[in-house]
Amino acid sequence: MEWRNKYNSFNSYKGLTYYEKYKNIVSWMDGKEKLGIPIECNLDPIAECNLNCYFCITQRYLKTNRAEVGEMRKLPTDYMYRLVDFLSQWGVRGLCISGGGEPTLHHGVWGLPLYAKMRGMDVSMFTNGTNINPILIESMLLCRWIAFSIDAGNSEDYQKIKGADRFKLVINNLSSIANMRGNSKVDLCYKMLVLPENIDGIYQACKLAKEIGVQDFHVRPADFERWDIKGHKRLQLDRRKVEEQFALCHEEENENFHVYTVTHKFDPEFHVHHDFTRCLASPIIIPILTDGNAYLCVDRKMEGGAKLGSCFPDPEKILEWWGSDKHRNMIKEVNINNCTRCTWSQYNQQIEETVLKDGMCVNFP
C-alpha cells in the first residue's frame, strides 16, 4: 500500500488527466501538429546550497560542472518576474520554484509566489527548510504545496545524510509555518528519501511530521544509481525493515494527515526499472536553470547535451525553439537504457498504453 486516498498528487495516474496533452505530443512527434504549451515551468533560481547531501542529484551542477551549465549561477530578480509574465501569457499553469540548490537563498524568490499567483499561476516550492523568515513564510503560504526535503527523523541521522547539524532549526521552521497556515490551502509535505542511514528512523520521522502539523508525509527509496553521483551504486536496502516501517507510518494516517510510501517507480527491491520503451512525456514541463537555459527534462537538466535553448535575457526566445525539429530530434535520440529513475516513467507508460495502443478504449466511457 502506497496511500489510502487515491486522489492525491503523488499518484501517477494523475497523468491520465493530461490525455489531450499526451495526444498532442504523439502527433507532434509524428510531424502532424505544433507542440502545445507545457503545463509547468520548473525553475532553478540559484546554484547554491547550504547543505551537503551526499546523494544530491545535482551535485555536479552545484559544485564542478560549469563547463556544461553556463557561468551564470543566479537568475536576476527582474528576469524571474519577466519570465513569469511571459509564462502566464503563454498559458503555462504551474510554476515550481525548485533548485539545483536551495531556492530560498535567492532573496528575489521571496516575493515570486505572490507575483505568479497574481498572474493566474499556481505555485509550488522545494526547500530544505533552513532559510525561513516571516517575510518568506507569508509568501510560501500562497503556494499550492511546499515540499520540505528533510530525509531524517532525528538530529544524528540528519547530520550523517545532510552534512550539517541543522535538524532542530528545520523542524522549528516547519512547525512555525504549520502553525501559521490558518486558512491557507497550501499542503505542507515532510519528504524523506530512504537511505541505509535512516531506515530505522522512518517511522520516527512520520510521527514527528504528524506532531508538527503538516498534511503529508512522503517517503520513497533514493535513486543512488545515477552515473553523475559521486560513489553511485545500487543501494541494498533491507526491504523487510523498510516495509515494516512503512506499515507503521500508515497506522498514523487520519483525515488531516496523509502518508505516501511511494515505490511504484522502482522494482520490488527498490532499484530503478522502466515500464516503457520511449521517452515522450518530457514536454509536459519546461525546466529552466540558473544559466538562463532550458533543458530537455527535469532528470537531465544539468547536462550540456540536454540543453534545449536559451531563455535569457528575453523569455520570448523560448518560442524560437520550443517544438522545433531540434527539440523533436533530441527526444527521439534519448536512450532510456542510459536513464536511471525517470520522474515521468509512469507518464511515458501511459502515453504508450492509452494513446499509442488505446489500451483503455477511451472512446467508450
Image (cartoon, grey):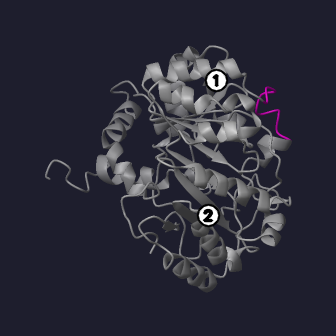
Give the structural element (helix, strand or loop) at label 1: helix
Taking the spot 46% from the left edge, 43% from the top edge, the residue there is 281
Q: Quadrant of residue 83?
A: top right
Look at the image and say whether residue 223 sits in the magenta stretch: no
In the image, what residue type sits under mark 2?
A: Ile
**Dot label at residue 164:** none
Residue 310 visible somewhere in the drawing: no
**Mark 1 — residue?**
80
x then y, percent, for residue 330: 56, 34
x then y, percent, for residue 338: 63, 52
Taking the spot 57% from the left edge, 57% from the top edge, the residue there is 189
Q: Residues within 10 Å of mark 1 (few under 14, many from 20)?
A: many
Of residue 266 and residue 227, the one placed in the foreground of this image is 266
**Mark 2 — residue?**
212
In the image, what residue type sits under mark 1?
A: Met
Q: Where are the magenta residues, as a range?
A: 64-73
Which image quarter holds the N terminus? Answer: bottom left
Taking the spot 74% from the left edge, 47% from the top edge, the residue there is 58
Q: Residues within 10 Å of mark 2 (few under 14, many from 20)?
A: some
Give the structural element (helix, strand or loop) at label 2: helix
Q: Is residue 292 left or right of residue 296?
A: right
Label 2, label 1: how far apart the Cα atoms are:
33 Å
